[in-house]
Amino acid sequence: MTSVITVPPSLDDYTFEQILEPLSKLPLDAKVLLDARHARWASPYGLTGLLTLAQTRLERLTLVVPEAEDTASYWARTGFFRHAADLYDLKGHVPKGRQNESSVLLEITAVSQSDDVHSVVDKVQQKAQAILVNELKLDAAATMRFTMALSETCQNIIEHAQRGGWVAVQTYKWQKRLGRRVVVIAVSDAGIGFRQSLESKPGRVRSDRWDDGMALEEAVMRGVSRFRDSGRGQGLAGVRRFISNWDGKFSVRSGTARIAIVPTWDEDVPLKENLPAFPGSQIQVTIPERIGTPVQSKTSERSLR
Amino acid sequence: MNKNRIDVSSALRQSVSQTYSHLVTRSTGAAVRQFIEQQLCLNIEDSYEQQDVAIIDFSHVGMMDFSCADEIVAKLILSYDEGARRFLFSGLSESHIEAIDAVLERHGLGLVNQEVDSRTYAASVLH
C-alpha cells in the first residue's frame, strides 16, 4: 500500500513539519507518494528539505510535481528537479529550468567536499553585493560577512554530516510575515546530526540530560565541537553573531529539536523539542531588508529554556 | 624583496588551487598554513635569522572565513614557541580582522595594530 502525504501549499521551515510528522511514523521501506500538486510556493528550506528527505528513505519516494505552471517553473529554475530526478520518481509535467533567475542567488547545489564550498562562495560573491547592498540596504561590509556565513554553514556538512548535503540561496519579498525583502540561506543534510556528532567527541562525559536540544545548545550557542582541537566549533557561533547584528534569524534543526536566534519581527520560540525525528541537520539563515538601526535579538544564551 | 614576507594569496594558489581567490574551508586553511611554514623553514635555513619578523600579507585575499582564520593565523602563532618567531599580519580588511579576532580570542590572544599602517597587526596575549 502506498501512503500519500500532501505537500502544504506554502512549504517553508514551519510547514515542512507537516510532511515530517506523518512520514516519521512510517517504516523506512514504506511506499510513499508526496503530493505537491497544490503547492504554490516553496522556500529554499522546503526544497532542500525535500531532497534531503528522499535521501533518508530506503524505498524510493514518488513526488507529484506542482500543477501550477509558475510554481513548477520556479522550482525548476531553482535547480530542484535536476536533483530530484535522481532521488524521486517524478510524476506530472516537469518544466525545464531557465538560467539567470534573478531571485535565485544560488541554485540548489550539492555540497560534499571542500571544492564545493569554494565553488558556492565564488558564485554567490559575484551576485551578493548587488542584492545585499542595493536591495536589502545592508552596508558594503555585509557582503563578506554574508559569504562567511554561507561558507561556515556549508562546512557543517563537510565537517559533521559524514555525507553530502544541499545548499540554496534565494531572495524574495516576504509579504505575509515581514512585508520586507529577505535573503535566505538554506543548508540541509541527511547525515548523523549534531547529537551523534558530539557524542563522538573524545573524552566526552555523559550527563543525565543529553538529547538533540542540548546538543544544539552546545554546538550553536557554546561553540562545542566533536574535535579535541580547541579552535574548532567557531563557525556557527560566528554566524550567530553576524545574524544578530543584521536583525536576522538563524535556526538549526537536528534530530527532534530546533534551536533559533529569534529577532523581534518573528514569533518563533528559541528552542523547540519533541519534533518528528529527521536525520541530519537543517540550517536556515534569514536576513531582512534593513529599515533603521539593528534591533537586539530576543534570544540570549540564558533564555533558551 | 623581504624573504620573510609571505603573500597569502600566492600561498593559496600554489598550495591548493590556481583558481581559488577566497580563504574558505578548514582543509584549505591547513594547506595554506603548511605552505607558509615550509616557506619560513626555507628562509631560516637560508639566513639563520630565526628571530626575524615574518610578515604574512593578506592584501590580495578576498574573503576569509573563521575556519581558515583559525587554521592559518591562530595555528601559525601557536605552532611557534614564544619568542621564536614574531608575526605581523598585513593588508587586513575589516572582515579579515573580524574573523581573526574571533578565533584568537578563543586562544586567549588578540590583534594589536602596529602603527606601521592601519592594516598591519600583531597578535598579543589578552589579559
Image (cartoon, coloured by chain):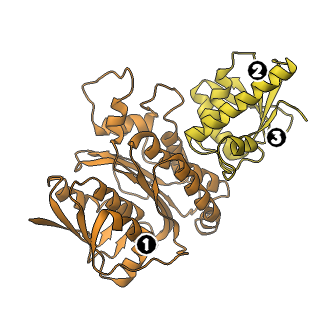
Q: Position of residue A43 (x, y in %)?
A: 39, 66
Question: Which labelled disc corresponds to residue A175?
Answer: 1
Q: Position of residue A171 (x, y in %)?
A: 50, 67
Depth order, front residue of A184/A246: A184
Q: Amino acid at mark 2?
A: Arg
Label 1 to label 3: alpha-carbon separation: 43 Å
Question: Which labelled disc corresponds to residue B118?
Answer: 3
Q: Amino acid at mark 3?
A: Ser
Task: Give the label, 2 or 3, closer to the camera.
Answer: 2
Assess disc 2: are there few (<14), some (14-19) or many (≥20) residues with their C-alpha within 10 Å of its C-alpha. some
A277 relative position to B79: left or right: left
For this orientation, the residue located farthest to the left is A1
Placement of A302 over or under A144, stated as above or below: above
Assess disc 1: are there few (<14), some (14-19) or many (≥20) residues with their C-alpha within 10 Å of its C-alpha. few
A117 relative position to A11: left or right: right
- The residue drawn where x is 65% and y is 41% is B98
Helix, strand or loop at disc 2? loop
Which residue was labeled with disc 2?
A: B85
Assess disc 3: are there few (<14), some (14-19) or many (≥20) residues with their C-alpha within 10 Å of its C-alpha. few
Placement of A257 over or under A227, stated as above or below: below
Helix, strand or loop at disc 3? loop
- The residue drawn where x is 65% and y is 22% is B79
Q: In the rendered image, what is the letter of the chain coloured orange? A: A
- The residue drawn where x is 43% and y is 59% is A265
Label 1 to label 2: alpha-carbon separation: 56 Å
Query: Which chain contains the residue that carries disc 3?
Result: B
Query: Which chain contains the residue that carries disc 1?
Result: A
Indicate the colour of chain B: yellow
Q: Amino acid at mark 1?
A: Gln
Q: Position of residue A162 (x, y in %)?
A: 39, 42
